[in-house]
Structures are given as C-alpha cells and as structure tokens.
Image: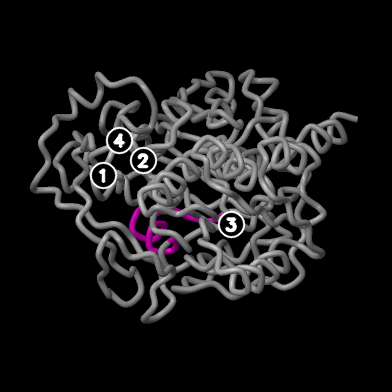
Amino acid sequence: MTETDSLVSHFECYDCGATYELDHTEFPCPDCGGILDPQYDYDAIDVSRDEVESRQDSMWKYRELLPILDTDDIVSMGEGNTPIVDCPDLAEEMGVARVAIKDEGQNPTNTFKDRGASASISGASQQDIEEVAIPSAGNAGQAAAAYTTRAGIDCHVVLNYQSNDIQKTMVEAHGADLHLVDGKLDKAGATFGEMRDEHGWYTVATFQTPFRHEGKKTMGLEVFEQFGWSGPDEIFYPTGGGVGLIGIWKAYQELLELGWLDDETPPSLHVAQSEGCAPVVEAIEEHRERHDAWECPQSIGRGIEVPDPGASPWMLEAVYETGGTGKAVTDGEALQGALDAARHAGVEMCVEPGAALAAAMQMAEEGAFDEDDEILIINTGAGNKAADALDYAIE
C-alpha cells in the first residue's frame, strides 16, 4: 500500500449529522436518506500550497483533500488541471475587468463529469466493489463507463431514449451495459431505483455516493489556485443536480479552514438554469430553503433539465452565503451563449454552459457588476456534445 496522505477521517450525513466509518457502503444515509459527505482532519495537513502548486499531473494533485487512502485505488486518466481561458472581447462587451472560462471540455471524455467519475470509481475500488450502476442524462454515464472499464469494474448505465447518440454509443464502446428507458431524466431515475433495488447494485449516482461530489470539488480547488488563491468575484454555474456548485462551495470552505486563501471573501455563486426547468432559481427568487419539484420540465440542455434536485438545501446555502443569485434563460439564449463563446473566445461549449454565459451577459446588461469585477463561467462540457443543437442554432 502506498498512502495518499489523505486527511479523510469519516463520512457524515449533511442532513442529520450521523457519522459512519470509511468502510461504510450503504448509501445514502441509512438513518434519514440524506447525503453522506467525507470529513477531513485539517489539523493534520502536512503539505504546503506551494508543494501542491508544483504538482501538475491531474486533479489528484489535491489527494490530501480527497477520500482515497491508497494510490493503487486511484482510477485516473489525467482528468482535471483544465485551463482558465481569458475572453477579453466578452469582458469589453460586459463592461468588466475580466471574463474567463474554466474549460472542462478538455477532460478525457470532454466534460466535467470525469472528475466525479474518477473519484467515485476510485471509491468503489477502495471498497472492493465489482459492479456499479448509474442513471444519467448522458455525460455522467459515458464518464462512468470509461472509468469503470479502466478499473476493471462492471458498469450498468441507465439512460433515457432522449440522450445524445454520442453518449449512447460511447457507453457501449467502453463496454458498459446500456439500459434505455422511456421518459425524461426523472422517469429514468425512478426506473433506475427499481433496477438498483432489484439487482442490489452499488450506485455512483449524484449524491448517492459520498465520493462523486469530492471529485467535482477539485474544480473549485483549481479555480482558487489559478486565481492566485483568492478567486474571481463572480462564478456562473449551469445547474442541474448542482454537484459542481456544491463542490466549489466546499472547496472554498476547506481552503479557508486550511488558511490557504489570500482573500477570504468567497466568490458570489450564481445558479444558471433553463426557463423550462428552473426549480433552484425559483427557490432563490422566493428566498426559500428548499426547492419545489418542477412540473413538466422542458429544456434542450438535458444536463440542467433536472426537475427535482435532491441537494437543493446545500445549493441554496452556497448561493445565500456567497451573495449569489439565480437566473433562468431560454433555450435560444443558451444556444446563443454557446455560440458567443465559440465566436468571441474560441471556446467550444455545449448548451448548458451556454446558459451560464447568457445569464452572466444578461446580468451585465442589468448593471449587476462593477467595472473592476472578474467573472468566471464554468464550461461543463465541450461543444461536440451538443453539435446537433448548435447546428440548428446556426441555421
């Protein structure tokens, strides 16, 4: 065994506070059904931020803050360490000092889902799991298929028929068992639950494993490092299940605990959703602590077409604590946002992050920012994942 020097100590339920040892495999929380979250002994840190900066391999440069104990259990393809791309034309148009895009499209399967897959499949390896399953709108399933085949773990991916043909093809190309079901993501999720219970599958679904959101946390750790350990003023995040938003919030809290931040003021975290499915934005506008499930979700951006996100209290905490907001845009505006990124910055993004850029541009028009503000857009996936939709928008 080669130790990772992880500071992880145990799992704790975000909802009820129950604690569990690291070999616990019953997810979510057996006491209340809540989200299990890895906890760390920050006082035991034995690495400096300068040493972390010198590591350039992957998201596992932050291994002390990830819940894997043995390097042999890490399943990685070099995910993470994605660039911050400056967009001076967009900054001039928005009247701010800087607009930048965190380009997660440069991950191995072209989306930020690789971070969660790397962490969750590493967690399954650590717990000696031989078979996993996941429901997905597409990208998370493709990522899980890629990382499980690398780990030698069998994988079941449940997609609905509306998922992109690229994702369906690649799930099977990686050797995973593809299950196609009727309905949108919420219906597919319900079917997945029935299949999981019937077969006893170990799930790596959103917030049903304590490992997956830790992988997304590394996106936030990178942002703070890349911004000189202070962070931008505003971060716009295309929000479906909200794993990445919560990951960025948790990254800030952990770096604050470690004393690694030169500026302790958190970036304002802004939720971007579709007008056809905006349960979290609606909750923010009404200053609630939990969302109401969205009826009849309809969006071309499948990744943000999540009508009933289970972690909304955690998301709303992040927004309220950082002074963020929520903004819903039309599908047309999201597509235009993706085209703006391609034409003004050369960055290829899919529809969901297009919604984030569109939301930021609308808020700029409303006078929400100061001229010295730095704004970061999270590009969660490459444009090739939405080629058909972008082609339609161009026509």
Q: Would you say the residues marked 2 and 1 are in contact, meaning their CB atoms lie under 8 Å apart?
A: yes
Question: Observer-nearest residue: 357 or 296?
Answer: 296
Residue occupying the far right of the picture: 395
Q: Residue at x 52, y 68 (%)?
A: 310
* Place of residue 163 in the rendered image (x, y in percent of width and height, measured from the top left): 77, 49
Q: What residue is disc 4 on? A: 71
Which residue position holds label 2?
73
Task: From the viewer's perspective, tell me whether residue 68 is left or right of residue 324.
Answer: left
Q: How much space separates mark 3 and mark 2, taking CA atoms?
A: 18 Å
In the rendered structure, find residue 204 and report the number of the disc placed on it: none
Disc 1 is placed on an element classified as loop
In primary-sequence order, the first of circles 3 and 4 is: 4
Q: Residue at x 81, y 41 (%)?
A: 165
* Residue placed most toward the observer, 328 or 200: 200
Give the distance between the C-alpha atoms of the residues marked 1 and 4, in whole angstroms: 7 Å
Q: Which residue is mark 3?
A: 133
* Magenta-drawn segment: 315-326
In the image, what residue type sits under mark 2?
Asp
Mark 4: few/some/many CA within 10 Å (<14, 14-19, 20+):
some
- Taking the spot 51% from the left edge, 61% from the top edge, the residue there is 202
Q: Earlier in the sequence, mark 3 or mark 1?
A: 1
